Image: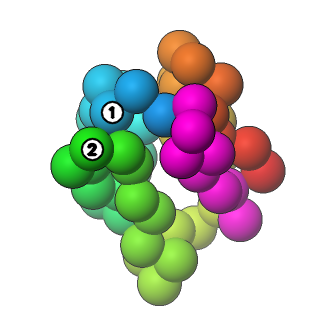
Amino acid sequence: MPTIKESECVGCGACADVCPQNAITVDDVAVIDKDKCVDCGACVDECPSSAIEE
């Protein structure tokens, strides 16, 4: 299950844009809804600041 490294997240929303389950919301930083996430890894691959890790 991916996790957000809040100190590295810039809140750009790239991860939310590619999430096929709409499991990510972004305010100041990204937040993953663990109930919706299917662990596909799309967000990990898309994050430009490497703030998401599996």
> Residue at 57% across / 19% down in the picture?
49
**Could you say which quadrant of the image residue 7 lies in?**
top right
Amino acid on which disc 1 is placed:
Gly
**Which secondary structure class fits the magenta region best?**
loop
Q: Determine if the magenta segment contains residue 3.
A: yes
Question: What residue sits right under mark 2 in the picture?
Answer: 28
The mark that comes first in sequence, 1 or 2, is: 1
Amino acid type of the residue that numbered disc 2 sits on in the rendered structure: Asp
Q: Nearer the viewer, residue 12 or 46?
A: 12
Q: Residue at x 42, y 36 (%)?
A: 15
| Most distant residue in the bottom direction | 35
The Cα–Cα distance between marks 1 and 2, rounded to whole angstroms, is 5 Å
Give the quarter of the image for residue 42. Answer: top right
Q: Residues within 10 Å of mark 1 (few under 14, many from 20)?
A: some
Q: Residue at x 53, y 15 (%)?
A: 48
Q: Which residue is mark 1?
A: 11
Residue 35: x and y, percent? Answer: 47, 84
Residue 20 among magenta residues: no
- Label 1 sits on a secondary structure element that is loop
Q: Tell me, for residue 54, which label it has, or none.
A: none
Q: Is residue 27 visible?
A: yes
Q: Is residue 25 above or below residue 12?
A: below
Vertical placement of residue 51 versus 27, above or below? above
Residue 24 located left or right of residue 7: left
